[in-house]
Amino acid sequence: MSVKKELISGFAYTAIAKYIGIAISFIITAVLSRLLLPEEFGIVAVATVLINFFNLLSDMGIAPAIVQNKSLNSTDYSNIFSFTIWIGVILAILFFIISPFISAYYKNEQLLHICRLLSVNIMFVTWNIIPNALLYKEKMFKYLAYRNLIVQLIGGSLAVIVALNGLGIYALLVNPIFTAIVMFFISYARFPQKLRLFFRFTSIQKIRSFSIYQFFFNMVNYFSRNLDKLVIGRVLGSGQLGYYEKSYRMMMLPLENITFVINPVMLPVFSEFQNDLNRLSTSYMKVIRTLAFVGFSLTLLLFFAARELVLLIFGLQWEPSVGVFRILSLSVGIQIILSTAGSIFQAANSTKVMFFTSLITAAINISGLFTSIFLFGTIEAVAYAVLIAFAINFFVTYYAMFRFTFYNMTYLANFLKQLVSPLCMCLLIAIVLFFMFGMQTYSVFQQEYLNLVLGLVVKGFVILIGVVSYVQLRGYYDIWGRVKMLVTKNRRK
């Protein structure tokens, strides 16, 4: 199968499951947001940040190394799987033990029980590293799509049932624990591994040079992206953290649901070109322009319809999240593009460059975070700091990629050219939206649900027409011709 067909097939299966999953996630989140308090979301947000840290410790860069390395055999997989089993057990026990200290630090007794329950998540996520990585290595995107969709639907439904039965904050724990357990058994059923009491480190040494820098990158990236939640929870309180977390998570939804479709497919497909950097760069450029059009269009929608989206999905009690969400939404376009950089570093076996680049970007993120919190002391200031940091990090990351991974700065000029036309489109549509709604674009519609829906539909329609018209008139894709062809084909049937 050609590279184009592999990418399209992988994108299609992953996208179908993921975008159906978006609808499911929106519904479940909307229900839980009305049943639970912002403070409860804030408490679980703290626990989730810590859980994700332990999951990073357990991964150690092994998963992408399994996908990228072409020399591993079944014995190697078995040895590495046995290693992850022991790591999972050890980390789960460790997290269970330190739960009282976490609870005491945040002065919240509920965190003790929440963290202890979530230790189960750590164990099963670690056990799933090898079976799950093999599914991606073998490009079994259809299998992965069905698995993810079914588990998400069942897990989310269970969370709602638990919330409706009055168990409050514990409803937020059902989905992550259920998902971790079921994902492991489904993946293991497809790629069962032999469990060895005594495993050989020679297999781990085969991926060490790749995984160690990947692990360091994951750690640095984790802290730079999650330190804001930990500091806000400590300095500004769980209520403000709840508003910030809801805004951040909502901003991340389109980002994650696009990059989740792109990145898992890019690594196994593009790793085939790890010895042909010119072909790797050329293939990447074709993806970038499409992502830029999609990402910048989403930025417009999220910014101009921030109030409608927040209040419709989460309810009127989440009004304080609107301003933060609007600021964060401005970073969505560049984040969508930036999030694919890791797959290219990995495919080119350049995790060392990726790690050292992350040290610079982390320093920028942390400096902005502490300046915004301790100088201004508001979640809006933190949102502005996040936006500025992402803009700077975008240029730092791609300079490092083309300077030290591809060793060809002409690729950087070609990369930037891919962004010019999408940016022009974004600017033109933004001018139209400001002209139509004026400076009242933030509050032109009242908070009644019918008017909120109307506002969202009108703004979405204007953006859609603008994007389609620009792409058609510029000749990037013959949308009108494609529609006519499909209509003619259906008539013949």
Image (spheres, helix red, strand yellow):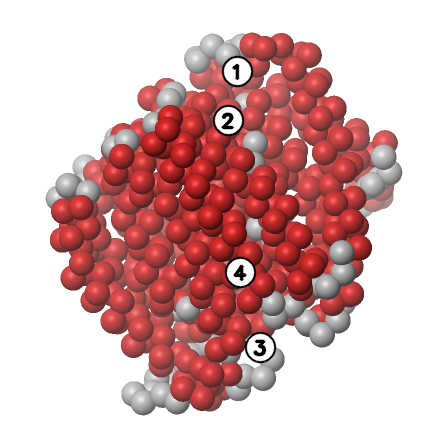
Q: Earlier in the sequence, mark 1 or mark 2?
A: 2
Residue drawn at x 48%, y 30% is 384
Q: Is residue 444 above or below residue 380?
A: above
Q: Name the kind of residue labelled 1 in the image.
A: Tyr
Q: Is residue 325 above or below residue 183?
A: above
In space, the residues marked 1 and 4 are separated at their CA atoms by 40 Å
Q: Quadrant of the C terminus?
A: top right
Can the viewer see residue 36? no
**Within 10 Å of the Cα at label 4, are there few (<14), some (14-19), or many (20+) other Cα atoms?**
some
Q: Which mark is residue 69?
A: 3
Marks 1 and 2 close (CB-CB < 8 Å): yes
Q: Which mark is residue 442?
A: 1
**Within 10 Å of the Cα at label 2, are there few (<14), some (14-19), or many (20+) other Cα atoms?**
many
In space, the residues marked 4 and 3 are separated at their CA atoms by 22 Å
Residue drawn at x 47%, y 34% is 385
Q: Name the kind of residue labelled 2 in the image.
A: Arg
